[in-house]
Image (spheres, helix red, strand yellow):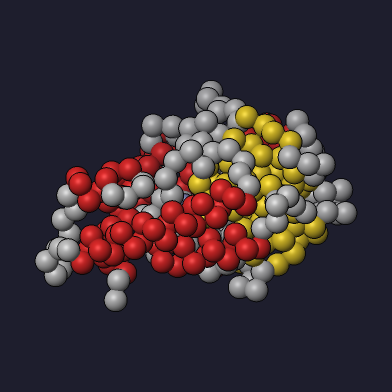
Amino acid sequence: MMQQLVPHVEQLDAHCWRMHHQGFSMNSGLIVGEERAAVIDTGSGPREAAGLYAAIRRITHLPLLVVNTHAHGDHVFGNKYFAAHDVEDFHATAAAAEHLRGHGDAERQLVRFLEPEMALRQGPYSGIVVPSGIVADSGEVLELGGVNMELFGLGSGHTTGDLLVRCGRILFTGDLVEEGGPPNFEDADPALWADLLGRLGEQCGRDTVIVPGHGNVVDVDFVRRQHREMLAAIREGKQIVASWPAGSFDPTAYQLELLPYGPEQSTIFLQRLSELLP
Ligand SMILES: [Zn+2]
């Protein structure tokens, strides 16, 4: 039998739960109304999805819908398990659906140690489910029965198709906010992301409970710090890129140390910055 990876479950208010997966420290969410419940991000494959589904069924037996905050494998590769358990309603941005359609198969290798069935396309739950419920650019409100959840984008950031989910004072941000590890710049435009974080920091109140894509729950001060840090990194990064001969990519160990994201993400950060600078 396939192994189940059981998430850590934390109730955040009367209707909202955070379900924290150990593998990539990724956060799924659960919002429960009187008629149906919403699952935010399904895990990195059938093992995490099976554990997540079991944890959800200990809380509610209502019909489920799924929201994907963006298209990265650790957030969407559990979709097939939910589809095989009577979930038909999958929501994401148009950009996320397009990314998943185009790059989903290539991302399977990223989860191979945690989710071998997903990497090897084995078993009934290893397919890729691309959401067909495309969220309007202006956002959408989904009614769960006595509880409303708001889906909205704030423009390009971690990817070109990031979705945020708000229910009362609980805000699920996907990987636009990361706790416990550096932001991931693989598909990001750093300047647009920093700009987005500035607007997000202004929108959040003192009492907003922010569930990041990875790691522990944070508050608005954390978002504002991540914003300031990214602005400073962009200033530093632009100078570093400008110091190289035109067209070259050659960060030194010293230059990487000037950035706050560790050698791997700082390298990717500089790469994205040099590709996207005018
Ligand atoms: Zn991501």
| Quadrant holding the C terminus | bottom left
Relative horizontal placement of residue 186, taking residue 263 as reference (left or right): right
The total number of labels drawn is: 0
| Residue 109 appears anywhere in the view | yes
Residue at 48 percent of width and 38 percent of height: 180
Residue at the left extreme, as displayed? 245
Place residue 12 in its image quadrant. top right
Task: Report the front residue among 29 and 231.
Answer: 231
Whole-percent x and y of residue 185?
A: 38, 55
Whole-percent x and y of residue 226?
A: 49, 52
Residue at 67 percent of width and 32 percent of height: 9
Residue at 59 percent of width and 61 percent of height: 200
Task: Report the front residue among 47 and 247.
Answer: 247
Residue at 60 percent of width and 59 percent of height: 201
Relative horizontal placement of residue 168, taking residue 191 as reference (left or right): right
Relative horizontal placement of residue 138, taking residue 76 as reference (left or right): right
Position above or below: 73 against 115:
below
Relative horizontal placement of residue 149, taking residue 90 as reference (left or right): right
| Residue 103 appears anywhere in the view | no
Whole-percent x and y of residue 128?
A: 49, 50
Whole-percent x and y of residue 45?
A: 50, 39
Task: Report the front residue among 126 and 192.
Answer: 192
Residue at the bottom extreme, as displayed? 278
